[in-house]
Image: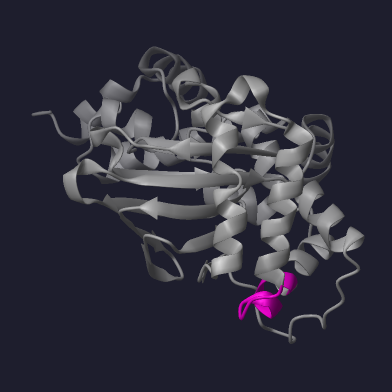
Amino acid sequence: MSNITIVPRSFKEQPAYNLIELDDFSGVIFRPRKELRKQEVYATCHLFVVVLSGEKVVHTPEGDFHIRSGNAFLVRRGLHMFSEIFAEDHQYESLIFFIDDRLLADFFRTNALTISSPAPGVQPKNIFQIPVSPLMRAGIDATLPFFSNKAAVSKELLKVKLTEILLHIAQSKQGTEFLSFVKELQSHHKKDLLPLMEENFARSFSVKHFAELSGRSLTTFKKDFRNTFQQSPQKWINEKRLERARFLLTHTDLNVTDVCFEVGFENLSYFGQLFKKRFGTSPKKITTAQNPQK
C-alpha cells in the first residue's frame, strides 16, 4: 500500500509546520518539501484550504478539481484524495484550516442560518471550490500574521477571524451549497460503521483514527462497534486484513512484503505472527506452494 498522509495528524507529528491548535479547529501555513508535491491524503477533519501561491489539482472519486492561486476549496471529513502541487520556482503555499463538526455546528446555530434541506436522493458534495471575493480575501489575509508569530497568538481572536471567513462563504454564490453541507452534518454526525469499516479496513489507520473518521469519541466508537460487529475493533480489523492477505497471496503474484502493507499492516514480523496463528501456516509457505519459483 502506498503511503497515505493523514491530516491533520501528520502536521501534529511534525513541529516544523508550526500548527496552531484549538479545541474545535486548527490551522497551518503549508509549504511542502519537494517530495510531498504528490500525496495520497485522507482527512479526519473537514478542510478549508486557500491556495496562496502556486496551483493544486485534487483527484477525488467525484472528479478532478484544479485550484489556482487565490482560490479556495472545502473538503468533507473522510474524503480520500490524491493531491498534486504545481508551482514556478518551487513556490507553493496554502493556508489550511482543519475544522471539527463542533465548530460548524456552533457557527450554524450562532448565526441563525436557516436553509432548506437538500433535495431527496441528492447527496451533498464532499468537495467544492470557493472563489475568493475581495472581502473574503481581506479576512483570509488577516489570519496570516497569526502563523508568523505563534507565541503571541490569541487563539480566541483567530477563531473570530475563521468565523468571519465562514460567513463570507455563506454569503457567496456557493452559500447554499455550503450551508447545505453544514446542515447535513447536524443530522448525519455519526457515520454508519459497516460501510465505513468495509471500505477502509485495509488502510493503515489505528482504532483511534477510525473513531475520528466515524465522528465518535474512542469510547463511544468501541461501544458502537461491538454492538454492530459483536467483537472488538482491533480483532475485527485484523481478521479482515488477514482474510484479504490470504486471498492476495493465493490469487496474485504479490510477495509477502507487498501483501503485508497492501492490507494495512505496518510490521512484517507482526503480520507473519498473526497470519500463522490464524491459518496455521506462514505467508511464505502459501506463496511457495502457489509458485515454487517465488
Q: What is the x, y in percent for residue 279?
A: 46, 26
Q: In the picture, residue 195 is in which quadrant?
A: bottom right
Which of the pair 5/204 is nearer the observer? 5
Q: What is the x, y in percent for residue 183?
A: 80, 68
Which of the pair 170/266 is nearer the observer? 170
Q: Is residue 229 visible?
A: no
Q: Please give the range of residues in magenta.
A: 171-179
* Residue 38 placement, left or right of 30: left
* Residue 229 placement, left or right of 255: right
Q: What is the x, y in percent for residue 285?
A: 27, 22
Residue drawn at point x = 72 percent, y = 45 percent: 100
* Residue 117 placement, left or right of 56: right
Q: What is the x, y in percent for residue 81?
A: 43, 54
Residue drawn at point x = 34 percent, y = 43 percent: 39
Quadrant of image for the C terminus: top left
- Quick check: is 230 in the magenta stretch? no
* Residue 2 placement, left or right of 218: left
In the displayed orientation, state which residue is furthest to the bottom: 119
